[in-house]
Image: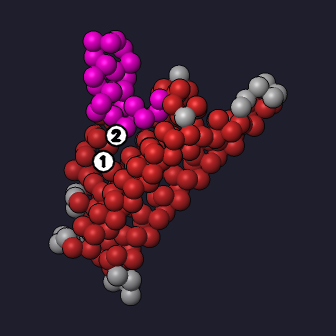
């Protein structure tokens, strides 16, 4: 339940709100004009916003990991396999980074905060819903192919180093593409400010 819902949904809510506030909200409210009036380029402004999002998501997952290890050791000393737990959280973090990248890209594409939020929140929420539906029954298990959370395969993540390395590289590459494309689009688009 912890990784099936709580540690997926709550970080997603944070990333959706943060990503939307970093670019689209500034454009929508007109405050982006002030940022762009400084001697900083559009690329630097958007890259700084992306870096902030990545850093905050990293800090969030690091904090969650440390707190859960601390609570586990306090309540059940020596029972947690910390290496496996960190591996699981690392894969969860990389998936969350891709989800944040989707929200950031949406924030860079749309000038209107509402539209940005609709796409930036809609896609990650669909991923969660597809995961939940796929877990209901074998008849609707095909929904697992429409969500990133299928990559959180417990047996493979905890026992297969090759699987973890492969999906980690794919998720890192996907994140880099999403953030880079967001910065590129923001640099090229016409702003209504």
Q: Which mark is residue 120?
A: 1
Asked if residue 140 shows in the view, the reply is yes
Secondary structure of the magenta portion, mostly? helix
Q: Quadrant of residue 47?
A: bottom left
- The kind of secondary structure element at disc 2 is helix
Residue corresponding to mark 2: 124
User: Residues in magenta?
Assistant: 128-153
Image quarter where the C terminus lies is: bottom left
Disc 1 to disc 2: CB gap under 8 Å = yes
Q: Position of residue 48 (x, y in %)?
A: 44, 70
- Between 169 and 23, the residue placed more toward the observer is 169
Residue 23, visible in the rendered structure: no
Q: Position of residue 144 (x, y in %)?
A: 33, 27
Q: Is 49 contained in the magenta span?
A: no
Residue lying at 47% horizontally and 33% vertically, measured from the top left = 152
Which residue occupies 53% across, 56% down? 56
* Residue located farthest toward the front when viewing the structure as drawn: 162
Q: CA distance from mark 1 to mark 2?
A: 7 Å
Q: Nearer the viewer, residue 14 or 139?
A: 139
Q: Is residue 62 above or below residue 28?
A: above
Image coordinates of residue 77 in percent, x first then y, are 82, 28
């Amino acid at each position: 339940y912890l990784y099936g819902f709580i540690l997926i949904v709550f970080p997603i809510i944070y990333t959706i709100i943060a990503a939307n506030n970093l670019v689209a909200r500034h454009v929508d409210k007109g405050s982006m004009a002030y940022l762009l009036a400084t001697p900083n380029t559009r690329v630097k402004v958007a890259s700084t916003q992306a870096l902030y999002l990545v850093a905050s998501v990293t800090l969030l997952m690091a904090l969650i990991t440390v707190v859960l290890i601390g609570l586990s050791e306090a309540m059940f000393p020596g029972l947690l396999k910390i290496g496996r737990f960190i591996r699981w959280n690392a894969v969860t973090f990389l998936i969350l980074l891709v989800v944040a990248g989707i929200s950031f890209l949406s924030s860079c594409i749309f000038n209107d905060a509402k539209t940005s939020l609709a796409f930036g929140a809609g896609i990650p929420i669909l991923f969660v819903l597809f995961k939940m539906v796929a877990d209901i029954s074998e008849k609707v298990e095909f929904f697992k192919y429409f969500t990133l959370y299928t990559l959180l395969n417990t047996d493979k993540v905890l026992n297969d180093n090759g699987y973890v390395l492969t999906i980690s590289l794919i998720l890192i590459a996907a994140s880099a593409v999403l953030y880079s494309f967001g910065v590129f689009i923001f640099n090229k688009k016409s702003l209504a400010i």
